[in-house]
Amino acid sequence: MAKEQRIIIYTGSVQGVGFRYTAVRLSTRFAVDGYVRNLPGGGVELLVEGEDAEITAFTKRIAERFDGYIRDQSVARHPCTGTFRGFVVKQ
């Protein structure tokens, strides 16, 4: 199966609630690579690469964990770059 990249922008009350570090901790359960970072406007950007099923399961788990905090999300799909190893908080 082909790998892909998704860039997801979460908005709502997603900063200051442990979103980034929880995402990194959750990523260890899935075969994904990439990063998560806060955005200046108060949102959070998640860039994740992997198989479709792994990304879907990972992002579903994030959505469940932060159900009361995420107001909206936008998703952009791109070809996998293969440049990421592991999943980290990006400053």
Image (tube, rainbow, N blue to C red):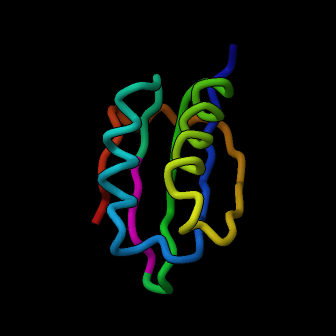
| Extreme residue in the top direction | 1
Left or right of residue 78: residue 35: left
Residue 4 position, x and y percent, is: 64, 33
Position above or below: 44 against 82: below
What residue is at 71 percent from the left and 47 percent from the top?
Answer: 77
**Magenta-colored stretch includes residue 15:** no
Position above or below: 60 against 68: above
Res 2 quadrant in image = top right
Residue 55 position, x and y percent, is: 59, 34
Res 11 quadrant in image = bottom right
Res 15 quadrant in image = bottom left
87, 80: nearer the viewer: 87
What residue is at 33 percent from the left and 74 percent from the top?
Answer: 16
The magenta-colored residue range is: 35-39
| Extreme residue in the bottom direction | 41
Position above or below: 26 against 30: below
Mainly helix, strand or loop, the magenta region?
strand
Residue 6 position, x and y percent, is: 63, 46
What residue is at 48 percent from the left and 67 percent from the top?
Answer: 44
